[in-house]
Image: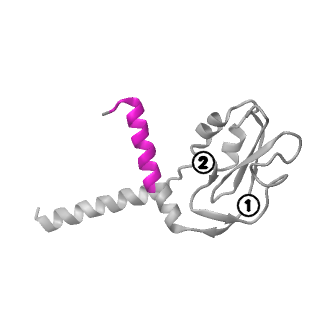
Amino acid sequence: MTRRRARIATYSGLAVAMAALLAMPVAHIDRHTCNLIRPGMTNADVERTIGAKPYWHDGVIGFQGGYPGGWAGRWPRGHFRYVPWVGLNGVIFVEFDEAERVVGATFHDYKPVRWSPMDFAFERLVLRFLKWCDWCWRAHVW
């Protein structure tokens, strides 16, 4: 095999790997995942279930709709607060009490209004790589 063919094969393999990584979401924000969130879970349990920390994912930087009960981070009714996980498929709102335990979770089919391809690629490529490095470090792979 000539050097040129080897280089083409290497670049083609990298392009296929990047396309595969771009096709797989980091955060699983959908109705099924929302149904897995149970009352009494901690924020860490919810992050493990969804696969990412709260707020914006998949390059979404704006969506049509509002927060149920007020702006995130406030205590809109009683002593509960809503935390959103926003993705291309919709939004999961998780309601936490004062002890930071889940009271409930709802999924809304909000559509993204603004989308950033740079944020999308950064999350799916760079953050996934950093998450993998963190896993390797904790598992003592190297």
Q: Position of residue 74 (x, y in %)?
A: 79, 48
Q: Residue at x 78, y 63 (%)?
A: 65
Q: Position of residue 19 (x, y in %)?
A: 42, 60
| Viewer-proximal residue among 111 and 80 | 80
Locate residue 139 relative to residue 70 in the image: left or right: left
Residue 135 vertical placement versus 69 (above, below): above
Does the rendering let one see residue 23? Answer: no
Q: Tell me the element at label 2.
A: loop
Q: Where, by quadrant of the figure, is residue 113 drawn?
A: bottom right
- Stretch in magenta: 125-141
| Viewer-proximal residue among 72 and 50 | 72
Numbered label attached to residue 110: 1
Disc 2 residue type (three-letter): His
Chief secondary structure of the magenta portion? helix
Q: Quadrant of the N terminus?
A: bottom left
Q: Tell me the element at label 1.
A: loop
- Residue 8 colored magenta? no
Q: Position of residue 31 (x, y in %)?
A: 70, 48
Residue furthest right as drawn: 78
Crowding at mark 1 (Cα within 10 Å: few <14, some 14-19, many 20+): some
| Viewer-proximal residue among 135 and 26 | 135
Numbered label attached to residue 28: 2
Q: Residue at x 61, y 38 (%)?
A: 49
- Residue 132 colored magenta? yes
Image marks 1 and 2: residues in contact by CB distance under 8 Å: no
